[in-house]
Each structure stands twice: as structure tokens, then as C-alpha cells.
């Protein structure tokens, strides 16, 4: 099975056997050269946040979603750069590895470009901000988010 096709094709399009073979190949690549997965995600036609969330779903179906942490540990900033273009994208990135919420938020908070992307997106930001606040009750978010959260809930005229 071609790894690029496996990553790009939605999880519901695979039989159990195909899913198992694809995830097995993915795990080999994650262990040997996780940056190859970044390159595949980067070159997909679909938005990266969708691809990553579906990849997490495929791995969850095979009971190994925790192995996606290899990618997050080694290439978090690249994932944030590829995936976060809106509040919805940020939510999809967090959904793919909720245990990385604090690290994701620190990565976004440390980069003005990432913050500006979110400031420019007012679509359903209040709902997603509430979602992030609920998830983050046990972790400390960067102070930039207090200001960004306030900015995002101001109604546009």
C-alpha cells in the first residue's frame, strides 16, 4: 500500500485489513523518519488539519493513536504551521492529540504569525474558545491567549 494514498484517503474508505496494513506502514515510517509524514501531509490537496484528524482516527481504530505522539514530539511546530489557519483548524489539531493541548497552545502563542491567523478568523470562534477553555482547565495557557480570547469574542460590526 502506498503511504501517501493511505494518508490522503478518508478512513471510512478502508476495510479493516487495509486499515491495519496502512497503519502498520505508517508506524514504520513514524519510527524511522517521521518527517516523511509531515511532507506527505504538506503536499495533500485537503487541508492539513483534516488530514491529521483523519490520520488520528485511523490510528484510533487500530488502537494505537498514542503512537501519533512521535510526530507531535518531533515536529510540533511544523504541524502547527501546516494545520492552524483558523479556530476550526486549531480545534482539529487539538482533537488529533488532546494530550498535547498545552504544547500546541504554547507553540501557537509563541508565534505572532499563528496568532494573527486566529485573530483574522471570527467564524464560530466563541464556540471553539469555550471548547479550548474547557479542555485547558488543568493546564496553563500562554498569556497571549487571554487577550486573543477577549479579542475574538468582540462582535464584529
Image: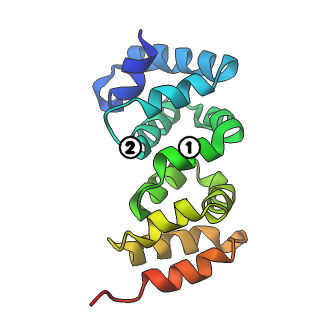
Q: Which mark is residue 50?
A: 2
Quadrant of the rendering where the C terminus is positioned: bottom left
User: Residue at the location (47% across, 48% down)?
Assistant: 83
Please name which of the two marks, 2 or 1, marks the residue nearer to the observer.
1
Residue at disc 2, secondary structure: helix
Q: Count the labels in the image.
A: 2
User: Residue at the location (31% across, 31% down)?
Assistant: 12
- Graded by Cα atoms within 10 Å as few (under 14), some (14 to 19) or many (20 or more), the crowding at tag 1 reads many
Give percent across and percent down for residue 61: 47, 32
List the single residue furthest toward the front.
113
In the visual, does 38 lie left or right of 109?
Answer: left
19 w.r.t. 79: above or below: above
Q: Earlier in the sequence, mark 2 or mark 1?
A: 2
Give percent across and percent down for residue 40: 46, 26
- Residue assigned mark 1: 79
Residue 69 visible here: no
User: Residue at the location (41% across, 37% down)?
Assistant: 51
Residue 76 visible here: yes
Give percent across and percent down for residue 94: 54, 54
User: Residue at the location (52% across, 31% down)?
Assistant: 59
Amino acid at each position: 500500500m502506498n503511504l501517501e494514498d493511505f494518508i490522503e484517503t478518508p478512513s471510512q474508505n478502508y476495510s479493516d485489513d487495509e486499515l491495519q496494513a496502512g497503519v502498520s506502514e505508517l508506524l514504520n515510517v513514524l519510527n524511522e523518519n517521521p518527517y516523511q509524514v509531515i511532507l506527505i501531509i504538506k503536499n495533500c490537496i485537503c487541508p492539513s488539519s483534516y488530514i491529521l484528524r483523519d490520520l488520528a482516527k485511523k490510528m484510533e481504530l487500530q488502537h494505537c493513536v498514542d503512537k501519533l505522539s512521535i510526530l507531535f514530539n518531533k515536529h510540533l511546530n511544523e504541524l502547527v504551521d501546516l494545520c492552524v489557519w483558523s479556530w476550526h483548524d486549531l480545534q482539529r489539531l487539538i482533537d488529533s492529540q488532546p494530550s498535547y493541548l498545552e504544547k500546541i497552545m504554547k507553540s501557537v502563542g509563541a508565534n505572532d504569525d499563528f496568532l494573527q491567523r486566529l485573530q483574522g478568523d471570527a467564524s464560530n470562534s466563541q464556540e471553539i474558545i469555550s471548547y479550548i477553555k474547557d479542555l485547558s482547565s488543568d493546564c496553563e495557557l500562554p498569556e497571549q491567549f487571554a487577550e486573543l480570547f477577549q479579542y475574538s469574542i468582540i462582535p464584529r460590526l
